[in-house]
Amino acid sequence: MPYPFRQPIWNKISVLSLLLAAGTVALLGFMGYSYVRSPIYTQVGKEKQQPIPFSHELHVGQLQMDCRFCHTSVENSSFAGIPTTDTCLKCHSVVKKDSPLLAPLHASKASNMPIEWVRVHDLPDHVYFDHSIHVNKGIGCVTCHGQIDQMEVVSRDNTLLMKWCLDCHRHPEINRREPKDVFDMVTGDSGSARMTNQAQVNPSSDDMSTYVRFLEEFADKDAQINPNQYQLQKVNRPMNCSACHR
Amino acid sequence: MAKKKMTIQQIRAKLQNRQGEKFWRSLDELAETEEFNQFLQEEYPHGSAPMTAKEDLSRRDFLKLMGASLVMTMLPGCSRQPLEKIVPYVTAPEEIIPGKPLYFATSMPFNGSSTGLLVESHMGRPTKIEGNPEHVDSLGATSAIHQSAVLGLYDPDRSNQVLKDGQADSINNLYRFLRKELKDSEGKGVRILTDRIVSPTLASQIRQVIKAFPGIKWHQHEAIHSDDARRAQQMVFGEYVDPIYDFKRARTILALDSNFMDNQPGHLRYTREFTARRRVVDSDVNQMNRLYAIESSPTMTGANADHLMAKNSYRMTLMVCALAQQIGVKFPAIVDGKLSNEEIKWVHVVAEDLIKHRGESLVIAGDRAPQWVQALAHSMNARLDNVSRTVNYIQPVASNPQLLQESISDLSQAMEKGDVNTLIMLNTNPVYTTARELSFETHLGKVSNTVHFGLYRDETAMACQWHVPSMHFLEMFSDGRASDGTVTMMQPLIHPLYNGISVHEFLHGLISADAKTAHDIVRDYWKSTSKTVDFELVWRKALHDGFVARTAFKPKKVQMRVEFAADDLGKLNRPSSTKADQIEVVINPDPAVWDGRFANNGWLQELPKPLTKITWDNALLVSPATAEKYKLENEDMVEVSNGKVRVSLPVWIVPGHCAQSVSAYLGYGRKHSGALGNDKGFNVTKLQTAEHQWRLSGATISKLGIKYGLASTQIHHSMHGRELVRSASLDEYKHHPDFAHAHAHGTQGYELSMYPQHPDRAPHQWGMTVNLNQCVGCNACVTACQSENNTPVVGKEEVRRGREMHWIRVDNYYEGEIDQPTTHHQPVMCMHCENAPCEPVCPVQATGHSDEGLNEMTYNRCVGTRYCSNNCPYKVRRFNFFQYADKHSEPAKLRSNPDVTVRNRGVMEKCTFCVQRINQARITAKKENRDIKDGEVVTACQAVCPAEAISFGNIRDPQSEVSRLKESPLNYGLLTELNTFPRLSYLARVRNPNPKLETHKPKAAHVTVHDHSEHGGGKH
């Protein structure tokens, strides 16, 4: 049945423009979301040029240097530590002494002015992260920083978004490894494989019940995990806001 | 609705007829003034002023405003992370691990002694001051003044260059000039003016200078001095001594105008020892001490007394004479007059109590108490066999003790006569702090060479030819002595920020052209006095510990007079009675800014002063009776006259103030203190005369008819007359140990809550207790919290709007009549409720609950609705209305605690139970694969408390201290009838009044349950 009246054209225009406006808002929202999640914003894979083109690929990958040789306070302090000029000069006062690439290093020593490195893994200022507890409780460097030993120029391997932190705090067992393997550059999968070799933990123990309760509380319903599948060490990672924000 | 203000008489009548509620917070509350009601009703008074001002706001304007606000709130979110640099050291300094603080022992010289401190340093930046637990004057505690020193260090208004006639010059030019001057004159006509010197090295250096140039005269000046005490000592002992009290052994204490809990040498130890016998909960209540006090001006000590007599100096002297006679001191009549019946009874009972506890009693008179009162106090201690039991006498801690007032008068006269050619002033500001009749500034003009050495380019520096910037004590090597003479070390925490020069190097520069560092000067001095072979070991240990053990002065054997003859009478001042139209003005140092030296310290300026809660100003404190007599209200301007000089001041009425005196405070009205302190308050120094520094008996006051706005926090954050403070006498406590629960309203339980109980998963459940028996209301916790948690300073205008940001406040409550009330202090911070009312109302979950029972605040989520604050019954949340925190200036950045976020505008904040310290302890414990020990987490307020009133720990562990305290019958929570289940609870106050002096029998309300049906919700 036809309408008794003919609709005026401007009605259509206004309906259309309303729809269009709603669509634009939705699109803008979606674009904003995509932007925040995209590497443009999270800077995953974005290589940053440093004052000295230091190669982790060479030092860690080929020369097999331990992370702690330069990042000295990673086990003791919240801050992993960046090598002092002297640390570099331990070798480079002899090795490749005259390389033009190392000129800023010698200049730093001569002028007693530090080298200003560009921060790659930069958490927002309202996040208080502590390296020492993660390293001490079996979270490997590679888990967060990626395969540094293959990076000529270091870039972020992970988004460093809060979701990414929480994913691990919800299921730390996936990433935990034995203390001796923490500084290994082997990737996460084989890391967790190591955990399965450990002694069984009695599922009725306190730890286990805490864990089960934790799962009920926080874990994604779809991602229910059978606790017996994992070999749990005593791990009581905080899930509170104040663990990181204060 | 304008309500007519109640007169003080009406308030009195109202109080007498009042039933049930026995505590009140302010006269405004009792009078129900409009302002008070407004403060009570509005969460943030004046907050909505811009909207309500424009009453004809149209719908269109409203939408415009809302749209603009929306855009503006969204825009700050559209920022990208800036590129940051990491700057490592070139050569790693020994011991510094980036991210971990180090603690260094040092000390702060203040008011004639040095207090040992531990200073937290983050990669070379001192950020927080703690007490040195092993130091005799600290025992781990500090005062608000110590806490604020770290802010003073970074003060951008500190002087930063050597000046000659206002032009930059070099220190070497000055050294050359002075050396030539000294050599030519051989010291004749050269005077050195210093503050009281407690540094043995500095004293030896001054003596060296005088030895090299024998003509030099050394004068001392400090605004707050103890000349009256020295005169009294001269009378009783025939020499100068410093008394050391032992409150551990004192059972009955009589304080005469003595504020031994606040800012006098040894006060932290005295407070610790005094309150240790008043814990009640885990100490023998039969050993509880009893404090009587007579005071002419309200102090913290008086507020904590079991019996307080507020009397002016004349009546105080009368009473003390009567008391001394009963105790057996012999002397002719010192003042004429008769005691009232009430006074006679009081004196009799107190004398009886003191004699009963012979050998474990103590009479302590303040340094500024009337001279005869002090002399008689010493003699009474001798008669009561207290000497070498509760009081010992040692040689004076300050070097070269003298009468400071005489010293500065001599100097002033010499300058007037033209005898002074060169005047060198070290760390003193006489142009501001000397009595006006000395005309110090005028006479200074007659001195040809004037040198000022100090932290600031202050009033004296402006009047001097030369000015030398001094190092702050956190920047320099020095030494000092604790109140008992223990040698105390001072070492630098940071390289001088503002080109400061060490006072040791400056004095060295006067006699030698060879540069020598302060470190070497101090070390060489001690090396020359030391007899040990391995001096290096002793020196290193001293620097590490902050003091040298077993260097306290040995108690002196003293000859004390207990009889005085008629010809002694004239040697000490005798107060005369005040005429009816006159009043005694008692002049005191300000509890926060002291003699004005801390006037540029924002933390101290904004610290609500004990009892009045006034910030940023000084006022004339008057009693309700005086206010009635002169028809005064709060904030009325009055003119105080001592006959020659008149000073205008605003009035503040203090319940319990002595009716025959009024109190004025020094330290305000500065002209050249720096941006924060200039022109704040009123200069009371003008009222002082050379002879009468502390009390002007014949002063008059007259009302000016104008008002001056004071920023007092007394009525802010009121919880509206509920049973917040609970208190009983010792007898009542013995009969009804659970008196604190007699007021319980209704039943409570989780079953009454609509929300599910928080599952307590975590093994640690944090809780706190505050023992009201021990809290003396000293405010140290307020500043400690401010320092630890980067709490900003907001300024006077914002405080007047109720926007002060302190996370912890110390509420005053009064009980009883307005003329003689009992005062109670109650520190209030976030209660960390298990059923926190703030949590469900947050639309963005910025405030939530941790599984350890903390009520968390996540700043980055907060959008500033302030619903949480509206819903908080305890009024402990603070909102950043503006960008209060300084995020950009270098000094502020350096000072901030890197472990705590510096908050932005538009964000709510509150006490976190020092979650950064909890996290740190948890991480440390986990790394060592152990549990967090009881006492391992110490909150900032707990650490600083000289009275050990605050306990913090895991309430899930029944063995922890806090669990044990919470088991006490005294334990009660605030507003528990609201079902909030606060994690912070209080231990009710038990006082120890003498039953013989109890004027009113305990009311039934103390111990029986009343039906408060108007509070609703409760079932009995």
Image (cartoon, coloured by chain):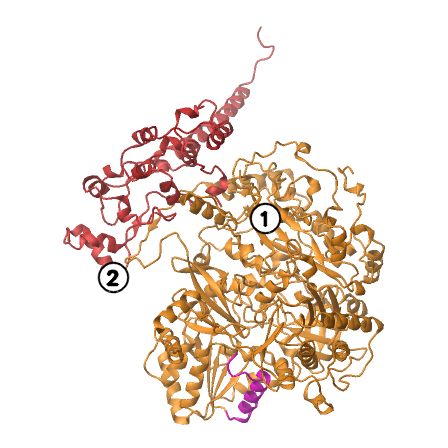
Q: Name the residue under label 1.
A: B962
Q: Quadrant of the C terminus of chain B?
A: top right
Q: Name the residue under label 2.
A: A111
Magenta stretch: give its range: B398-419
**SS class of the residue under badge 2?**
helix
Colour chain B appears in: orange
In this rendering, the label closer to the viewer, 1 or 2 = 1
Where is residue B782? Give x, y as percent: 58, 57
Colour chain A appears in: red
Q: Is residue B37 left or right of residue B46?
A: right
**SS class of the residue under badge 1?**
helix
Where is residue B258? Give x, y as percent: 66, 72
**Where A181 falls versus B626 (above or below)?**
above
What secondary structure do most residues of the magenta stretch adopt? helix
- Same subunit, tags 1 and 2: no
Q: Residue furthest top?
A: A1
What type is the residue that disc 2 sits on? Ser
Work out whether residue B910 or residue B415 is closer to the camera in this orientation and state it: B910
The chain under label 2 reads A
**Where B436 falls versus B730 (above or below)?**
below
